[in-house]
Amino acid sequence: MMTTKTTQNGAIGLAIDDAKIATLTLQHASGANKVDGAFGAALNEAVTWLGQQKNLSGVIIASAHKDWSVGADLEMLYKARDAAAFFENVRQLQQVYRALETCGAPVAAALTGSALGGGFELALSCHYRVALADGRIKLGLPEVLLGVIPGAGGTQRLPRLLGFQAAADIILQGKSLRPDKAKAAGLVHELKDSAEAVIAACREWIKANPKATQPWDAKGFKFPAPRPGSEQARDMLLVGAAMLHKKTAGAYRAPEAAIRAVAEGAHLDFDRALEVEARHFVKLVVGDQSKDMMRALWFHKNAADKQQDLPKTDTADFTKIGMLGAGMMGAAIAWSCAERGYQVVLKDIKQESLDAGYAHCKALTETRCKHLDQAQRDQILARITPTLELGKLEGCDLIIEAVFEDPELKRRVIEETQGLLAANGVWASNTSALPISDQAKAAKDPQRFIGLHFFSPVEKMPLLEIIAGEKTDDETIARCLNFCKRIKKTPIVVGDGYGFYTTRVFFSFILEGAQLIIDGQPPALIEWAARAAGMPVGPLQVFDEITLSLVTHALPQAKKYVGDRLPQQACEMVEKMVAEGRAGRAAGAGFYDYKSGRRDGLWSKLAAFASGSAATKTTEEIGERLLLAQAVEAVRCVEDGVIKRYRDADVGGIFGVGFAPNRGGPLSYLDRLGIDNAVQKLEALAKTCGPRFTPPKLLVEMAKSGRRFYDAV
């Protein structure tokens, strides 16, 4: 017989059976078990209720929703600015978790869905964890990816469970693991094939372990080697801190706070260590960096993924897709479509290119689909039809071209293939820069002509830039948005014009890096300054990766459309380097030297391109110039009507071209800098560097009126 009730706010169901095993069922009214005020109050009430049960045998924590717990309520974190008040709330939650794990009965987590962040920290406060063996489930502590750290005991429980190195690897990278990987890492104890079996396993464990306690609460507990205070532990933390700084260049506060919390807490008793964690956590939450990262990486990305404020359609999805060009880009797009269930015709004009493209698809299947069995992997490849024959494209309701960036070649390809489209089929260009409206002049139905700009490597890059030409209709946009959702890409929908949005911002970054060399700044300092500002990679390294020849090929068109805003000296420098055979990594030489395909230091003769001598700028000054070069171009895109939703500027900047995630995107960066302050800095740079830094009228007007891109928080 089961006795049941709920907490006063209904967020947790309470039940106890004849065997005196209690079940706490997480059932937040929002439909997702998030850690917020209501959850904290309910859990506190539930733990109090547990203490009132006589002869309690054990506790199972289960979920009534798809996910076990999605973690902290980010709206709550985003709005938090009162450090003292928030610290009290955090400490109360920590103490409730602590009361649960010291309630005197064995506690098991029945992980039948994903458990992340504060939700997984709740699971860590349980003595035993059984997870459903479902590849869709994620378990882990992703907090650093949003500018904060675990704040409900994660930085203290995980090191005591796994040891310094294994715990730091999970916390500092914000890892979320599938159940099988989580078990191998020691995060869960058992896997079961059904929700019923998960609950049954929890019950069996409770019966077999009536006196279970957490390892750190057991008498004689010893920290997993290396033990705090040992020479090995000190060396590990020192090396870890050095490696972290090398990786992040000090631009991200959360990973540094995490390693501090782990190191400091390890020397303290557990309850005192939780307080240390809370102080680091709260400092990050109320700070600016976490706000900017949450806005862009969570709220704006989710809005883009949900396609808020974008065209909708009830028209059936595409079924057969034609991919023109079997190069690395075309093959990866074809594979991405086939992996999501589409029938794909991969077309090229050379057999060797077709063979290489199909081999790339095979390699992607083996490396990206290890969680599938061989039959499922074979099905993906079976959906791809490589061909040299135009006729195989007959009946495709979406054709995507990924041929060479030559306007005349693209015109011929359009004319040659558009007649093979199914009725109402859509023709899409994967161009990174050539205006869609210009290409659509060769199309019979320009309203069904669109740009679908993928990013390399396609299988890893999450963004899809959808470009609407002058005549592209909303139905076509909506159909492509449905396609985008199915292939699991994050869309931004932008207006037309040379370079659209992402290419314009990207070019501003890499060309400014080259111009800084001409201005006499040390190349190594340029690279470090970019990373210290938050860019994942320096501009010279990125330039080499995409190849200098790709940029020189694009320069004639770029000069035609935006010539006055290009740093002309940088363009000439790049053209000279290509002429000398230094076209980038693929050529074995570029801004960097290479040995066996690996970077072998910056080219020693780069300084010869400097025009005269200049005082060396500080890391901060160079980093700021690189960020402002991108941000001012983003504002021009808003002014030109290319960017129609502010969120697209920040989502596209971060996920498309790597604009410093710690800044929340280019528009967020300008807001944080202060619009008036940004205008003054741009005006000063325009005087010394040229018209590319001239602040757009929009920004000047915003400075005068006190407007921002986003509401202050």
Image: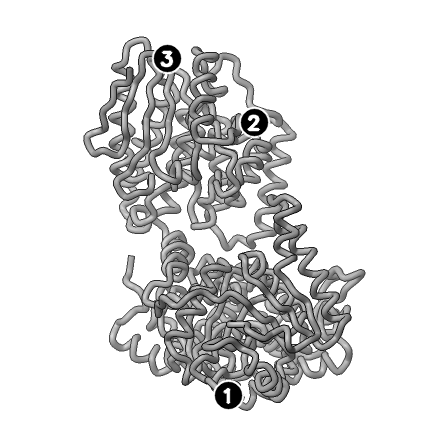
Specify the quadrant of the image occupied by residue 13: top left
Q: Which residue in the protein does label 3 denote?
A: 57
Q: In which quarter of the image is the C terminus?
A: bottom left
Q: How crowded is mark 3: few (under 14 residues within 10 Å), some or many (20 or more)?
A: many
Q: Which residue is drawn at 45% across and 34% down?
A: 154
Q: How crowded is mark 1: few (under 14 residues within 10 Å), some or many (20 or more)?
A: some
Q: What residue type is labelled 1?
A: Asp
Horizontal side of residue 362 vs 25, given as left or right: right
Residue 502 pos. (x, y %): 50, 72
Residue 235 pos. (x, y %): 64, 35
Q: Is mark 3 on a helix, strand or loop?
A: loop
Question: Is label 3 in contact with label 1 (beta carbons under 8 Å)?
Answer: no
Residue 1, above or below 375: above
- Is there any visible trace of residue 66 in the rendered image? yes
Q: Residue at x 66, y 46 (%)?
A: 374
Tag shown at residue 94: none
Residue 243 pos. (x, y %): 61, 46
Q: Which residue in the protein does label 2 denote?
A: 228
Q: What residue type is labelled 3?
A: Ser
Distance, label 1 to label 2, CA atoms, is 65 Å
* Marks 1 and 2, the one that precedes in the sequence: 2
Horizontal side of residue 5 vs 381, given as left or right: left
Q: Which residue is drawn at 72% across and 79% down?
A: 577
Q: Which residue in the protein does label 1 denote?
A: 438
